Image (tube, grey):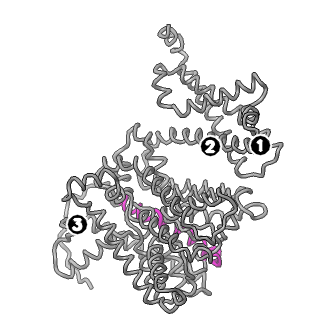
Amino acid sequence: MLERFNQFIYDTKSSVLGIVGFISTIATMATIGLIIYVVGFPATAENMTFIEKVMDVVFQVFAITYFVKVIYSFERIKFIKETIYEAILMVFILITAIGHALFSQDILHTLTGYFSHISAESFREIYQIIITISMLYIVGQKFVKASSYVHLLTINPAWTFILSFILLISLGTGLLLLPEMSTHAGGANLLDAFFTSVSASCVTGLIVVDTATYWTMKGHYVLLFMMQFGGIGIVSFAAFFTSFMRHGLGIKHQVAMQEFLDSESLSSAKNMLRKVILITLLIESLAATLLFFTWGSQVEFTHLGQKIFYSIFHGVSAFCNAGFSLFTDGLYQNIIRESYLFQVVIACAIIIGSIGFSTIQDVLSPKKLRERIQKPWKDWELGSKISIYTSAVLILIGMLLFFSIEYNNTLGELTFFEKMIASFFQSVTTRTAGFNTLDFGEFLQPTLIFMILLMFIGASSGSTGGGIKTSTFLLITVSAIATIRGKKNVDLGKRHISNDLLFKAFSIFAFAAFYNLMMIFVLSIVEPNIDIIRIVFEQVSAFATVGLSTGITAELSLVGKIIIIFSMFFGRIGTLTLALALSTRVESTNYKYPNAHLLIG
């Protein structure tokens, strides 16, 4: 019987599924429009009633198209198992529609009858949240399916990263321009929205408007979204989704993923990708939980939900090294800067986010920990050692220098213990994150100079931070020492460092140095009233995606802000793009010219 039915519908399968696909596309576009309208525009009783009716129609269309796909799938049980979450959602939609058709009332009224102590308005809010999440899930699922065809494109892997960030920035700017996202009458200014979107997407933290008061709660959710996707790299969610892997990943893109995650092989890059999102969510959840219990007693929240959201926001901002805060003065706020346990949690989240996903996997994964317990002789990978040891040395040096230089200045009124915590926190956040618990406008020039150096070095490869990376800095240093000592080979950790790696490190350093010098030169022209040390600090902070400022960001001219925008974007993708370009061989190099004899130095 079933076989006859399959034979009966076989001839119409192609045409029916084509029509279903077209209808699904129209419904998806309608869903996106509804989400934007609900989230971004003021809600009234009349338009919300209309929107809910349209939502019901759109959902029923999705349910019908899903069941048609089930019918035309000749392995129906397997299809349902592969789309189990969508199946559950469609069943819920079907039950809601049947209930409304038979009893002329939706589930809300039924639930209100069972839970009389909860108002219908509360149920309405819960229902709207469920519907919004469901709609986002449907759109996300369509996006994932669409991303499975990215491998058919023949673009350079470097462009995949560039376009992914352009997409994220464009989406963020559009959302921040919606009336409900800001407290500014008529919506946010285009430049302010664009600047904030770039800063959040590139996990920088520089701001031209007060994050706490200029953006509404919905705007804060958008910032959280952009920090999360920008920190991990939206490419991990799009071009390299797990579903994308099942359709086959080209060698070019596997190489790009290997570079992005700083893994040693293509297979390990593919395996690590599946763990990146899980690792991120676990660490951010732990950070948010610890922050929830370490807010100072002076910090008052209007309700429990606000405290939870503030904890999640700052946990994500810390791990992604974004530096955004929901307080007007950042962590320099009076009620925050004396919460030293809170600062330690933030610092730890920053450090973990800055050492790189491959290092986190190598050092902290349960599997690796068990292996080292069973085999004590098994050591960390070389990349993990470079990341952790170099970061530790830079943090210690920065802490001691900051402590000694600012001892009688910005640290003057603190106790010895408080000075140590403040110095440690500022050393950690200077390299990557951009939080501040002290007034940067009062720092001495020597402090600003060594902080510029720390920002320029930045975080570790494959992390959420910026800069030229600790591995680049270490390879240049080791190579310089080897040259001075007259060594022909560069060795590190009983491993030979190939010339390809050294050339890549020097290229990244040269590019970063040249770019920053050029932008500092231009900024000094367009911002003649600002001290050069503050201009240098602002530019390096933007390029290294740190987000620290001496307070001049909002004072910059239009041209100055555009330069900082470009620096944040290019700093986030520039060195990575250069590394990917250098790793791609497009022509033969199986030849060698005669040795040149030049005077150097």
Kindly report the secondary structure that dominates the magenta region of the rendered protein.
helix
Q: Nearer the viewer, residue 143 or 595?
A: 143
Element type at marker 2?
A: helix
- Camera-near label (2 vs 1) is 1
Q: Nearer the viewer, residue 137 or 162?
A: 137
Label 3 sits on residue? 497
Element type at marker 3?
A: loop
Amino acid type of the residue tagged 1 in the rendering: Ser
Residue 577 among those drawn in magenta: yes
- Camera-near label (2 vs 3) is 2
The image quadrant of residue 60 is top right
**Is residue 134 shown left or right of residue 128?**
left
Magenta range: 553-581
Amino acid type of the residue tagged 2 in the rendering: Ile
In the displayed structure, 103 sits above or below 573; it is above
Mark before the other along the chain sequence, 2 or 3: 2
Residue at coordinates 22% horizontally, 69% vertically from top-left? 492
- Camera-near label (1 vs 3) is 1
Indicate which disc residue 106 carries.
none
Estimate the x, y position of residue 285 in percent, counting from the top left. Answer: 50, 55
Label 2 sits on residue? 133
Estimate the x, y position of residue 349 in percent, counting from the top left. Answer: 46, 64
Mark before the other along the chain sequence, 2 or 1: 1
Indicate which disc residue 119 carries.
1
In the displayed structure, 164 sits above or below 516; it is above
In the displayed structure, 46 sits above or below 499; it is above
Amino acid type of the residue tagged 3 in the rendering: Ile
**Is residue 299 shown left or right of residue 388?**
right
Report if residue 589 is visible in the image.
Answer: yes
Element type at marker 1?
A: loop
Residue at coordinates 47% horizontally, 55% vertically from top-left? 233
In space, the residues marked 2 and 1 are separated at their CA atoms by 22 Å
